[in-house]
Amino acid sequence: MRKVLFVEIGILLQKDNEAFSSYNQVYDKKYGYYDEDQFFVKTIQEGKEYINDYIKNGVINTYGIISLIEISKDTPIEELNNEVPFSIVKYNVEDVVYSICKDENNTIIENFINQ
C-alpha cells in the first residue's frame, strides 16, 4: 500500500436540497458532497493552489477537499486520473488534510470539515 493525495471539488448541498440524501454518505455527513471532479496531485501545495482558485472563482457552496488515502502500490495513478473508482476512496474525515468552502455569505472557510 502507498499513500497518495486525492482532491475532490464540487458543491455542498444543504439538507433542504432534494438530492441531499444521495450525496451525504461521505466525510462528516453534515452536507451533501456533490462532486464535480476528483483527481490525484503530487503535493499538498499543488492541490491547495487548484482548489483555492476553484473556490475563489466558484459559486456559493463550492468546496474543495484534499485527502491522504491509501491505494495499492500497483495502482497506476496516471490511469486513474481519467476516472477515479469509487471503491478506492473511503471518504473518511480522518483522511482529510485540507478542506475549504465558500458559504452562503460568500465567505471562504478553510478546514470546514474539521469545525
Image (spheres, rainbow, N blue to C red):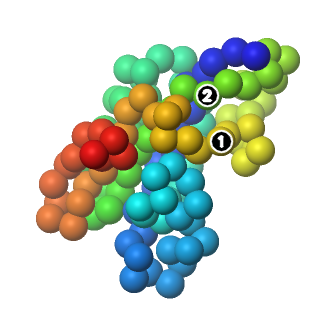
Image height of 19 relative to 27, above or below:
below
Foreground of the two, 27 or 54: 27
Residue at 50 percent across and 84 percent down: it is 18
Q: Of the two numbered discs 2 and 1 on the same chain, state the one appearing first in sequence.
A: 2
Residue 46 % position (x, y): 42, 23
Q: Quadrant of residue 14?
A: bottom left
Q: Is residue 99 visible?
A: yes
Instruction: Name the residue that disc number 2 marks.
Output: 69
Classed neighbour count for the residue bearing mark 2: other residues with Cα under 10 Å, few (<14), some (14–19), many (≥20): many
User: What amino acid is labelled 1 in the image?
Assistant: Lys
Image height of 21 relative to 55, above or below:
below
Tell me if label 2 and label 1 are in contact, CB under 8 Å. Answer: yes
Residue 110 % position (x, y): 25, 40
Classed neighbour count for the residue bearing mark 1: other residues with Cα under 10 Å, few (<14), some (14–19), many (≥20): few
Residue at 26 percent across and 55 percent down: it is 102
Residue at 15 percent across and 54 percent down: it is 107
Disc marking residue 52: none
Classify the position of the N terminus by image quarter: top right
Asked whether, in this view, residue 31 is left or right of residue 86, the answer is: left
Q: Is residue 54 visible?
A: no
Q: CA distance from mark 2 to mark 1?
A: 8 Å
Q: Quadrant of residue 59?
A: bottom left
Asked whether, in this view, residue 86 is left or right of residue 50, the answer is: right
Local SS, label 1? loop
Image height of 42 relative to 26, above or below:
above
Residue 108 % position (x, y): 20, 49
Foreground of the two, 3 or 63: 3
Instruction: Name the residue that disc number 1 marks.
Output: 90
Residue at 22 percent across and 46 percent down: it is 109
